Amino acid sequence: MTIDRRTMLRAGMAMFSGAAIEAAPARPSRTVLRRIATEEAWSTPEHVAALCAIGQTGWDNLDARSWGKVTTTSQLARRLVDVDERGRVMQALGIDMHVLSLTSPGVQMFGREQAVAMAATANDRLSEIVRSQPSRFAGLASFAPQDPARAAKEMERCIRELRLNGFIVNSHTENEYLDLPKYWEIFEAAEALDAAIYLHPRAPADTMAKPYADYEMQAAIWGFQAEVGVHAMRLMLSGVFDRFPKLTLVLGHMGENVPFHLWRTDHWYERRRASAVSKLRPSELFKRNILITTSGVEHAPALRYAIEVLGADRIMWAIDYPYEEMAPSVSFMNDVAISEEDRAKVFHQNAERVFHIAPA
């Protein structure tokens, strides 16, 4: 049996505070596939410090509460910042590339001027990392929706000058959603630049926060997917994709539950057409304009369902590091019972197409 040598590598070094590096998962014999992980959080020390500081203000906001539990010396903070250690784990597990993006909630909790400046600085730093290790890292640029006009200019700079691979936005900003026409400059820029926007979660907006404040529900257990699912449905029903038919949106976490409800959303769309601006059904828009990633969802039935409903061309692999560990995600995609053609699409081909990553 031929063994994928990269996958079988074992690392003897210690990771961060002495924990052993993740053990490489075993992999059955098959063609060696490139592995591109598409939702991999990253940050700068200054950005982490600013978010931790917000967490200590006593602001009764769910994102602030979450960051109030993080310190600048925590394992999470170190993993967000340290790309060298990240690279060693990737090599040990046979992961070829991380598509890096500024960790949630990005710059969207800060005042306008601070957010604009912070996004530009983060994008410059991210571009330096990508240029220094172009075979290992790609990057999604952040921007400040607080100022849509300057956001659009920063988006153009990031693609044309910094040569980054797309964009990330962390859902709502100032308790508003991007379906509002005041934000449409952002979509116009993304479409013109042929660059996808990754709609990443953050905790529910203050306007919907109360039911999520108990039992740690604001985060990945339920709040993230509920909040981004609402945002995605607003975008689909608002006419955004009618106005920008070539816009590409990416949803993580197996589509934030939306693909599993498309039949019902179509059903009620037809019964309530007068309430929607879009002329196309949600499923039509989803299959034309939206892709999903597997980030944080290592569940074979969910992946096979998504392939059946959306098609393997609409799904990309992701880990959600450092919020999730790398090794289980690699093992899942190595071994999940799907065709080898679909595995190649999910592991790397779709990411190469969507984020303009050169084939290996």
Image (cartoon, rainbow, N blue to C red):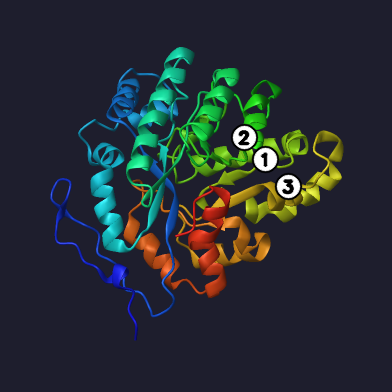
Is any part of residue 315 visible from this angle? yes
The local secondary structure at tag 3 comes to helix
Name the residue type under label 1. Leu
Residue behind mark 3: 285
The location of residue 225, given as percent across then percent down, is 53, 44
Precedes in sequence: disc 1 or disc 2: 2
Mark 3, mark 1: which one is toward the viewer?
1
The location of residue 327, given as percent across then percent down, is 32, 61
Task: Name the residue: 56% across, 41% down.
Answer: 226
Task: Name the residue: 65% across, 66% down.
Answer: 308
Quick one: 207 or 12, which is closer to the camera?
12
Is any part of residue 145 visible from this angle? no
Mark on residue 247?
A: 1
User: Left of 90 or right of it: where is 194?
Assistant: right
Name the residue type under label 2. Ala
Name the residue type under label 3. Leu
Above or below, comparing residue 103 to residue 222 in the picture = above
Quick one: 67 or 161, which is closer to the camera?
161
Q: In which quadrant of the rendered view does residue 49 lie?
A: top left
Residue behind mark 2: 190
Above or below, comparing residue 104 to residue 79 in the picture = above
Mark 3, mark 2: which one is toward the viewer?
2
Q: CA distance from mark 3 to mark 1?
A: 10 Å
- The N terminus: image quadrant: bottom left
Mark on residue 308?
A: none
Within 10 angstroms of label 2, few (less than 14), some, or many (20 or more) residues?
Answer: many
Count all numbered tags in the image, as a single digit. Answer: 3
The location of residue 330, given as percent across then percent down, is 38, 63
- The C terminus: image quadrant: bottom left
The local secondary structure at tag 1 comes to loop
